[in-house]
Image (spheres, coloured by chain):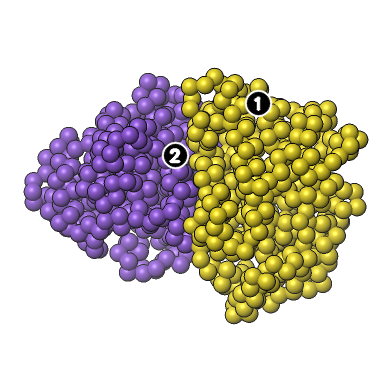
Chain colours: A yellow, B purple
């Protein structure tokens, strides 16, 4: 086990009706906020009205900025920063999924910085202060509601880049599983794939002696795998959504990676794919992760065999090689069963030149991953395995 | 799953050598502290000197108060409060096990309160502010290093009472498994029993639909059960202690009980036992928990059968009744294998009158527990099952 620091101060306010407490919870921090959201879904669902009412009841003034798209754009982040400065705003509320929360975090980073916020993503400067952010989560997926990360797409350069800092952890996040009842099936599946991927990035590590976090990763994966398929039959089962929403949060609050060396190659490989093609992150991960697993599993067949037994319930009698392959196959089949694409050609038809371009972008800052280091050629091989 | 709030802001600084960063981490909060500890063990181990050096290097002034005993006493807490007021101290560092940290928390509660600190424990007043506390942990057990609780013994009235508040969560805690290498075997066993008990109090619940936290409780118990016996053979295995220390922390930071109704009858029953006889808390729990399990398991045989299968690895072919009984037996045998007493008569010889007295004290504030409510008569029955 490696030395680690675990710091996850976000207060998780979880359960039925908790979005009505949004204003009351903000009031402790600020009386004037930016209310940031996406398209029309929170208006259709009634969440928008509930939040506005709760802000008014608590005496919290707000300026609105909607329009966040999937793969949140730098241009809207810049607009948010301008708004906050104009209105002297010191707190940002995000209502939506990971894209909205990530956009809110990037705005929070930029308000107090004199230069352009993209500087942080380009590693031109370091973050020393950021505005407090809170979230009302509507899509369990990205884990941004308590993570220290944000991922922003610069639409001019087609670069999708992540940034991490403990300063970006929301002060509180409101998680009501009822808010997921209106989520389309594909969104549910993308989210489930994303949270599983967050665990995979931590689980497959070269660090030895991680009994507790091995067990915790497996425990969370099993809760997801048991519950997600039930949503295909009944999208309004509170208890099932509660398991998925809680699991998605735990998958990315940092705990499951403590003492481990995390990988994150697959996320970077996916980001390059979805930056170019603007496909959903969860769909990209369902394509990239099985391919990555196939590319790397021989590096530690035992760990992939353990994954097959402890997560997928495969009988331990087989050889490690057989088990490892079975575990990867079960993962791919599970994604398929949720209606996800698992091959690039299910949804796209890139040329060899396109793959080369994406491999180059993915490795623009150097090799990817830690389980095995992947250079541009290796990333190209993963894309080809994913075709 | 019940609605819940999860808030665990304590920063966990974990690994080899991290105690040398104590001063640097305190400096962010305060330049003058109370340094609180127990007997001579931190002086013998060299930890005392390491902390003093680190405080001096960081420019942190300190006033010392040693002498915390197991089952920490109200009289020393009062002395600490007096010292903090005299020296205008606003931060308390605890170096030791749960008793020292609990004592530090109680001092932190009392400094800003005009009345006697025992008022909080007697529910005569509510806590609205408390000084920040940090810990250097030497005994993985109580989980006080990131919990919101403290338990203090009033030696005048022989009452041992707990108090909980989010204000009591330490701002940071330093966990170095190497600091456990000097721990006597009985202390290790008490600690292991204590952390397992913290999970049991959360695991056995009447709330349904807790797949994730069921899995997490089982995951943590399995890590403890796999590793603790190894310490009987080699008390200086870093990786084994790392699993135990991390598990002990997770067992009581709140996560494993989220969405569940927790029980806590066994802790109260044990507190009454150890307040009267001054035995170690972990020893008392090893005696009380198997008896409590025997008393209550028929209330939800299925849950106890699940416990036997998922935690102890019993084959699921047996009837639920058989499995439930096996799980309880395995628990008792495990405690025995660590050298713990599992019956009152292993270490004490109380009269019927003594048991009556303890049952009365344990239920002084009303019935205990939630899985099944236990009145004084039921508590007496548990004591008798534990004889």
- Chain to which mark 1 belongs: A
Q: Say which mark, if any, is on residue B202.
A: none
How far across and down, in percent of the image, does residue A240 sit?
51, 55
Q: Position of residue A218 (x, y in %)?
A: 52, 38
At x 29% / y 35%, what residue is drawn? B318
Distance in Å between CA atoms under marks 1 and 2 = 27 Å
Figure check: B261 above or below A371: below
Above or below: residue A298 compared with residue B322: above
Query: Mark 1 = which residue?
Result: A297
**Label 1 vs label 2, nearer the camera:** 1
Residue under label 2: B220
- What residue is shown at x 36% (from left), y 69% (from top)? B125
Q: Is residue B179 visible?
A: no
Whole-percent x, y for residue B51 in the image? 51, 38
- Circles 1 and 2 on the same chain: no
The residue carrying pointer 2 sits among few (fewer than 14), some (14 to 19) or many (20 or more) residues within 10 Å by Cα, namely many
Tally the numbered discs: 2
Q: Secondary structure at mark 1?
A: helix
What residue do we see at 52% from left, 21% from top? A318
Which picture quadrant has residue A87? Answer: bottom right
> In the visual, does A36 lie left or right of A211?
right
Extreme residue toward the left, this view: B352
Q: Quadrant of the C terminus of chain B?
A: top left
Numbered disc 2: what chain?
Answer: B
> For mark 1, does the 10 Å Cα neighbourhood hold few (<14), some (14 to 19), or many (20 or more) residues?
many
Foreground residue among A317 and B254: A317
B46, B132: nearer the viewer: B132
């Amino acid at each position: 086990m490696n030395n680690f620091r675990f710091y996850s101060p976000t207060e998780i306010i979880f359960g039925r009706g908790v979005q009505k407490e949004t204003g009351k919870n903000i009031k402790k921090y600020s009386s004037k906020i930016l209310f940031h959201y996406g398209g029309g879904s929170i208006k259709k669902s009634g969440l928008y009205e509930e939040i506005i009412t709760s802000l008014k009841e608590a005496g919290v003034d707000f300026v609105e900025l909607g329009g966040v798209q999937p793969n949140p754009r730098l241009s809207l982040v810049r607009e948010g920063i301008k708004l906050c400065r104009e209105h002297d705003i010191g707190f940002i509320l995000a209502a939506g999924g990971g894209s909205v929360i990530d956009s809110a975090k990037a705005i929070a980073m930029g308000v107090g910085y004199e230069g352009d916020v993209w500087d942080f993503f380009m590693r031109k400067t370091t973050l020393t202060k950021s505005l407090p952010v809170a979230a009302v989560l509507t899509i369990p997926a990205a884990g941004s509601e308590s993570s220290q990360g944000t991922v922003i797409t610069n639409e001019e350069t087609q670069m999708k880049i992540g940034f991490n800092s403990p300063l970006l952890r929301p002060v509180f996040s409101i998680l009501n599983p009822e808010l997921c009842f209106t989520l389309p099936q594909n969104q549910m599946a993308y989210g489930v794939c994303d949270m599983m991927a967050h665990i995979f990035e931590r689980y497959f590590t070269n660090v030895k002696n991680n009994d507790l976090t091995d067990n915790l990763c497996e425990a969370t994966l099993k809760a997801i795998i048991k519950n997600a398929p039930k949503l295909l039959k009944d999208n309004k089962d509170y208890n099932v959504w509660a398991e998925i929403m809680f699991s998605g949060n735990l998958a990315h609050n940092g705990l499951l990676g403590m003492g481990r060396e995390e990988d994150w190659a697959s996320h970077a490989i996916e980001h390059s794919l979805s930056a170019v093609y603007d496909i959903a992150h969860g769909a990209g991960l369902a394509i990239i992760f099985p391919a990555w697993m196939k590319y790397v599993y021989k590096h530690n067949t035992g760990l992939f065999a353990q994954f097959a037994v402890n997560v997928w319930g495969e009988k331990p009698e087989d050889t490690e090689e057989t088990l490892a392959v079975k575990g990867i196959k079960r993962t791919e089949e599970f994604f398929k069963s949720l209606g996800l694409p698992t091959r690039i050609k299910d949804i796209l038809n890139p040329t060899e030149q396109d793959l080369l371009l994406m491999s180059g972008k993915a490795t623009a800052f150097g090799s990817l991953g830690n389980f095995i280091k992947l250079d541009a050629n290796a990333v190209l091989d993963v894309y080809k395995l994913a075709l």
